[in-house]
Amino acid sequence: MMLIPTHHFRDIERKPEYLQPEKCAPPPFPGPAGTMWFIRDGCGIACAIVTWFLVLYAEFVVLFVMLIPSRDYVYSIINGIVFNLLAFLALASHCRAMLTDPGAVPKGNATKEFIESLQLKPGQVVYKCPKCCSIKPDRAHHCSVCKRCIRKMDHHCPWVNNCVGENNQKYFVLFTMYIALISLHALIMVGFHFLHCFEEDWTKCSSFSPPTTVILLILLCFEALLFLIFTSVMFGTQVHSICTDETGIERLQRKKQPREHSGSWKSVQEAFGGNFSLNWFNPFSRPCQPETPIDKGLVRQVSSLSDTDNMGTTESQLEETKDRDSVEVLDE
């Protein structure tokens, strides 16, 4: 249960006429166990396909342009195993980040019956999302692409065609880490390959013609450098968010209102699951978090109801706050 400071009372609607919970459709029946989570967004699907294409292109150039034609078999085998292992882990992390429910709030549960079942006491409130007609838990935000409220939503990433939230942040962090590692590895191999080819005949460096080989290597170098910078920044941003226990949206919304942070190591353990182990780097290992109760964080406590009694909601205020969260307040 969360305390809501008095300076947030301006967001509280005493008469949320634009959202009538009695007209909300009952929440849909949950799908069968193991139902795959997938967002049907054209832009996100295209970005996910491009991501796979770029990784597979890097695989093609590394294997068929640099490693297989090489006469140093030990060099080729070691680098081939390392690069393919990192590429496999990157694509596996991408799939897990894309196909894992990021922490969606049950849709359409802001019904009169469900609100009454919470048995709100004086001074307690629940936030209702007018867009998906759901009761919004603490630290949840509505995603216009997923069309759902997501617990601890950090941002919506088109490259994984999903939100980054409470349940899949680990997979997104692993995806950015492994992409940065294979990008760095590819850059190093391209550098060694250029040096080797300058010392010998270009026709012996690759099974392709010299112009084709140069073009393929330059494209790979550009791709690797671009994604190394991008994913390294994203990796650092995500690790910082986990350590400070503050999502990207919360950091943008917070101005001069500091929020209490939990311990850095505790936040990391909650995100990756338990004490440090190799499972932290395993995209097939789920975070060891207890199943989130359906009513977790739904009810919040206001610090003073006297301030809300002095507030009146005019028609103009209702129009200005239609995109904000509605609040159900139980009067004393």
Image (tube, grey):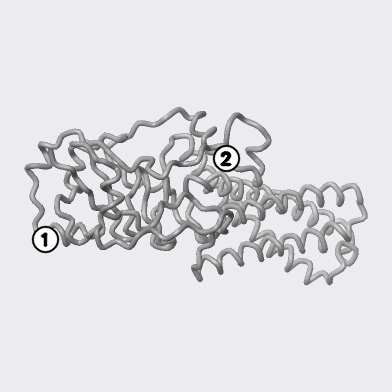
* Along the line of sight, the residue nearer the viewer: 106 or 45: 106
The residue singled out by tag 2 in the image is 287
Q: Is residue 146 left or right of residue 48?
A: left
Viewer-nearest of discs 1 and 2: 2
Q: Secondary structure at mark 1?
A: helix
Image point (14%, 37%), residue name: 305
Q: Amino acid at mark 2?
A: Pro
Within-10-Å neighbours for mark 1: few <14, some 14–19, many 20+: few
Image point (84%, 70%), residue name: 208
The residue singled out by tag 1 in the image is 316
For the residues marked 1 and 2, what is the alpha-carbon distance in whole angstroms?
46 Å
Image point (84%, 54%), residue name: 196
* Along the line of sight, the residue nearer the viewer: 80 or 107: 107
Q: Quadrant of the C terminus?
A: top left
Q: Is residue 26 left or right of residue 321?
A: right
Residue 98 placement: quadrant: bottom right
